[in-house]
Image: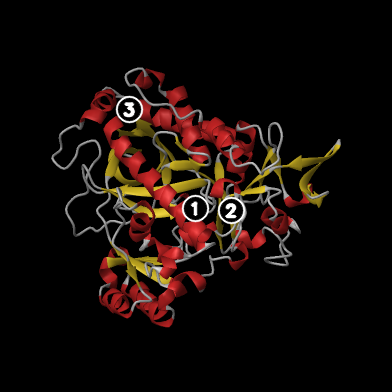
């Protein structure tokens, strides 16, 4: 979810800037768009929708009437970054990912950052995302969060901000890859005008990263499995997509058992050892003997096996403490503490409502702020002040007074826009960017990431669950 403020100046347009002049990275795309007939663009958009429907790229939306399957809107005009822009983003993202992993290791070991008073101890110890069961655990290579999605927003030519860190089970990489394949299929002539850096090797990089964190004692090629909750999960397409692309097994809890000191998978030829489990379920469901006893999605005994170093779980249990929204406000200090340098990419200013002064400011300025639940996601459970009704603001005021520790607030931002094909032509729409970072023996990234775009006029919602769509993201060669 991203936000803008209508009272501020017009948003920065990534093709036209603030002054209406075509920016260099978009010069050829603008010329191509000018030569296109509106009917042709509409036809290509329908072709893309048919392609995605045939492949099965849908997601589940959960509501009062249950879940419904929807097609994620796809925009056929790419979002473009120059090589220089990407270099800056890449450096800032890598710095952030290394610092967050150092933070996770420290929090579950000596807790030096708490001893130094950088973060209030109660913010960690009393946080439901913190897992005391992980204290002293030694994941292979000391890596906790192997797959991270960093949500970025842009407000001007040179100003990028980190809106969120996703260190648990970030989703969307399959859409990034399928968006690229769709663009190559639909507009090969447009690619011929540009030198676009490739992203197709992401599944290979993912497998290489996972292999690099195999448990000690594994001889030969480790066996990797993707643990999915099943076909009814909103991200099931991605689970099966990634398992297929990187040559891994796709498993559910019913396929797994602990036997002979190993996690094993039931096959037609008997049991087969799994060395690395890329889980796509929440911590609470991993092991009914340790966490939720009613879980049917996890494996009894899995956590003890993990603690014994007999299987690698990706991402490690307990990583959610690093992307908790209450912790987000401290990430600049976390980066400085573990790297000795200031952050390359800044945070959005954040008010922690557990702080009485911050709470007083937020309550006084609810109509100008965005308020989020610290454990919320997907655009749910939040207030966008400038676009909220008086009734909604009044309701949120009561929520904040009742449970201030459950919320943070941020000023609204004039997020950048990009030209997007809409029903009556081409118009600017707000967007964000989620690069995907792989961390094992080293940091690996494909250039760009998933651009999420708010498809409705004036909308600031980029989440697919709230009507947002996606674009292909191009990072140009030097």
Dot 3: element = loop
Sequence-first disc among 3 and 1: 1
Instruction: Tell me which label, 2 or 3, sits earlier in the chain.
Output: 2
Q: Nearer the viewer, residue 48 or 125?
A: 125
Nearest to the eye among marks 2 and 1: give it.
Answer: 2
Q: Quadrant of the C terminus?
A: top left
How far from the left and from the top, in percent, is residue 193? 32, 19
Q: Is residue 332 left or right of residue 286?
A: left
Secondary element at image label 2 = loop
Please give the residue where the numbered disc 3 appears in the rendered image: 476
Q: How far apart in space, not on screen, are marks 2 and 1 (Cα)?
A: 9 Å
Q: Residue at x 61, y 59 (%)?
A: 283
In the depicted view, which residue is nearer to us: 238 or 100?
Answer: 100
Say which quadrant the N terminus sits in: bottom left
Asked if one can make out residue 225 in the rendered structure from this viewpoint, the answer is yes
Mark seen at residue 167: 1
* Observer-nearest of 320 and 191: 320
In 3D space, how far apart are the residues under numbered discs 3 and 1 (Cα atoms)?
Answer: 27 Å
Residue at disc 1, secondary structure: loop
x and y percentages locating residue 377 in the rendered image: 47, 59
- Determine the image quadrant of residue 383: bottom left
- Label 1 packing within 10 angstroms: few (<14), some (14-19), many (20+): many
Q: Residues within 10 Å of mark 2 (few under 14, many from 20)?
A: many
Whether tag 3 and tag 1 are in contact, CB under 8 A, the answer is no
Identify the disc placed on residue 316: 2
């Amino acid at each position: 979810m991203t936000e803008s403020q209508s009272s501020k100046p017009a948003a920065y347009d990534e093709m036209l800037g603030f002054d209406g002049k075509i920016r260099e990275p978009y010069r050829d795309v603008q010329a191509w768009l000018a030569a296109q007939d509106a009917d042709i663009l509409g036809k290509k958009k329908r072709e893309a929708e048919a392609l995605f429907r045939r492949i099965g790229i849908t997601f589940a939306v959960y509501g009062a009437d249950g879940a419904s399957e929807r097609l994620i809107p796809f925009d056929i005009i790419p979002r473009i970054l120059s090589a220089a822009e990407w270099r800056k983003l890449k450096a800032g993202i890598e710095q952030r990912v290394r610092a967050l992993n150092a933070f996770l290791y420290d929090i579950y070991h000596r807790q030096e950052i708490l001893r130094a008073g950088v973060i209030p101890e109660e913010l960690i110890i009393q946080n439901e995302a913190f897992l005391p069961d992980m204290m002293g655990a030694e994941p292979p290579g000391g890596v906790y969060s192997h797959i991270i999605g960093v949500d970025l927003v842009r407000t001007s030519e040179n100003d990028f901000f980190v809106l969120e860190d996703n260190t648990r089970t970030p989703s969307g990489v399959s859409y990034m890859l399928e968006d690229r394949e769709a663009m190559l299929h639909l507009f090969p002539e447009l690619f011929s005008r540009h030198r676009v850096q490739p992203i197709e090797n992401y599944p290979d990089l993912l497998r290489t990263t996972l292999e690099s964190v195999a448990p000690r004692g594994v001889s030969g090629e480790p066996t990797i499995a993707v643990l999915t909750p099943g076909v009814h999960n909103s991200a099931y397409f991605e689970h099966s997509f990634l398992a297929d692309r990187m040559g891994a097994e796709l498993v559910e809890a019913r396929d797994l058992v602990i036997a002979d000191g190993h996690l094993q998978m039931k096959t037609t030829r008997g049991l087969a050892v799994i060395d690395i489990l890329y889980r796509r379920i929440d911590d609470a469901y991993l092991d009914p003997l340790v966490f939720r006893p009613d879980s049917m999605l996890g494996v009894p005994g899995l956590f003890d096996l993990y603690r014994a170093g007999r299987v690698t779980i990706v991402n490690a249990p307990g990583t959610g403490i690093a992307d908790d929204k209450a912790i987000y406000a401290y990430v600049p200090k976390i980066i400085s503490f573990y790297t000795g340098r200031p952050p390359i990419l800044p945070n959005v200013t954040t008010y922690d409502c557990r702080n009485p002064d911050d709470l007083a400011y937020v309550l006084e300025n609810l109509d100008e702020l965005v308020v989020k639940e610290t454990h919320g996601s997907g655009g749910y459970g939040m207030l966008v002040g400038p676009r909220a009704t008086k009734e909604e603001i009044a309701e949120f005021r009561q929520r904040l007074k009742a449970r201030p520790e459950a919320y943070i607030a941020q000023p609204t931002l004039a997020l950048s826009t990009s030209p997007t094909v809409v029903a009556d032509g081409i118009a600017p729409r707000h967007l964000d960017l989620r690069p995907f970072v792989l961390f094992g023996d080293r940091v690996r990234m494909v250039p760009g990431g998933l651009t999420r775009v708010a498809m409705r006029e004036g909308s600031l919602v980029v989440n697919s669950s709230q009507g947002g769509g996606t674009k292909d993201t191009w990072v140009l060669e030097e």
